[in-house]
Image (tube, rainbow, N blue to C red):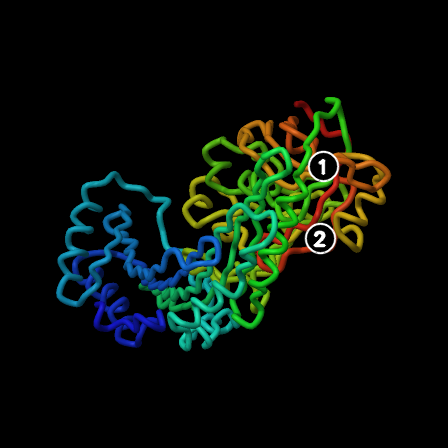
Amino acid sequence: MTDNLNINAGLLLPEDMELAKSALEIALKEGASKARANLSFSVMDLVATLNGQVDKVTHSFDRSLTMYIYADGRYGTFSTNRVSADSLTEFIRKGLETVRALSPDPCRDLPDISRTALDAGTGLELGLWDPERNDMDPQRRRAIALGASIWPKEGLISEEGEYSDSVSDLYLVDTQGLECRQIETSFEYGVEVTVQDAAGNRYSGYWWDSNPKLENLNADECGPAALKRAMSQFDPQDFPVGRYNMVVENEVAGRLLTPVLNALNGSAIQQQNSFLADSLGKKVFPDNLTVIDCAREEGKSGSRLFDSEGVATSNSIIIGHGVVEEFFVTTYIAAKTGLKPTVDDCSRPKVMPTMRGGKREIMDRLSDGILVTGFNGGNSNPTTGRFSFGVEGFLFKNGKILHPVREAVITGDLVTLWNNLTAAGSDYRRCSSRQVPTLAFKDVDFSA
């Protein structure tokens, strides 16, 4: 198969897609009732720098074929990296032997063809592929990585940067006639710097940027941003424990949305491992919380026209003015639970703003509180929604930062926390697939 793949471009060729279709034909010939084939190929090149010098260069690629086989009321999934015409029949035969040894599962099925994506024929529909990737070479990657470096600079102890570009190509077909494809590129740069204060204490800061299009990558802004974040941590101080207004910076605010989205996943609900299991159609959150899935936003990271089953995505409301409007329910989970089938997950969630501006405007509005700029471990209980997170950030008063806080922990439950949402800004990070702006909450328990 390697000879049939455009390794440099990272794109599947017509003969590769014909091979995936032939895999379906073989599966039916060998006795399968239905089947789906997912053929994927990805390539990534990376240049890492250390203190202004190239430290590591890597080139990697991955190709795989995953078969979803239905036979005699049974089901199994099988993957291989040996994707070639001469090995395909044996691979599928062995898969079918395994499937026939499994227990029957009447809930397993392909999605209804009427629910699948009919508008993803070329893989280019969402504008996520940049042909500039084809013109990248080692010299150009090296120039981008070194050009983004801010080394040497006064106060810097070390600087570790990474530039990478990649392309992925996913092709999905099934025996019902489904055929869809997505091609996307990604250009990314991230850097971590370490600085030292007058007392010899060291602090680190990180910043990154990413975009499907090279021309929109702002690699040269990352070093100065990381340095500023590192130096802002000088002289951390203790603070009185208690309840505070909490402002969570846009770079890390997604950490608080993730467990909510996870709790809306049909598999968690089916396994009774979700604190939102009975929430569909109910007002669980405040009026000022609306979360939409911008699944089909053209040119944006995370966008997709179809999910892992080939089901068509849509721009939909997940939580509307506090009401839970949608669970993420696959065909299998729908059959197991009786829930309406939707998609397997949220593609590009976006918390809608309640005001213009970001952390500065929100801090001015709240006057006093703690600005959270990072999470340091902790967890949340998916069944109860109770959480305990280590955080780092700054105490602020009258809208102005006073000093960094040291070893802070926030505790509570996620439903109460989100019901204490007082503001959501409009300062989304365009590089993130999770569009969560700076958020503000009242009455959050902080301890040292």
- For label 2, the residue is 352
Q: Which image quadrant for residue 280? A: top right
The vertical placement of 219 against 418, above or below, is below
Q: Position of residue 266 (x, y in %)?
A: 49, 42
Nearest the viewer among 158 and 211 is 158
Nearest the viewer among 276 and 80 is 80
Residue 126 shows up from this direction:
no
Q: Position of residue 73 (x, y in %)?
A: 27, 47
Q: What amino acid is at disc 2? A: Met
Question: Which badge, 1 or 2, comes first in the chain's sequence?
Answer: 2
| Quadrant assignment for the C terminus | top right
Q: Which mark is residue 115?
A: none
The vertical placement of 416 against 30, above or below, is above
Q: Which mark is residue 394?
A: 1
Tell me what residue is drawn at x 53 percent, y 55 percent: 347
* Mark 1 to mark 2 CA distance (whole Å): 25 Å
Crowd tier of the residue under label 1, counting other residues whose Cα lies within 10 Å: few below 14, some 14–19, many 20 or above? many
Q: What amino acid is at disc 1? A: Phe
Q: Position of residue 358 (x, y in %)?
A: 75, 51
Q: Secondary structure at mark 2?
A: loop
**Are the residues at dot 1 and dot 2 in contact (C-beta closer than 8 Å)?**
no
Tell me what residue is drawn at x 41 percent, y 56 percent: 309
Q: Is residue 170 left or right of residue 198?
A: left
Q: Secondary structure at mark 1?
A: strand
Residue 369 shows up from this direction:
yes
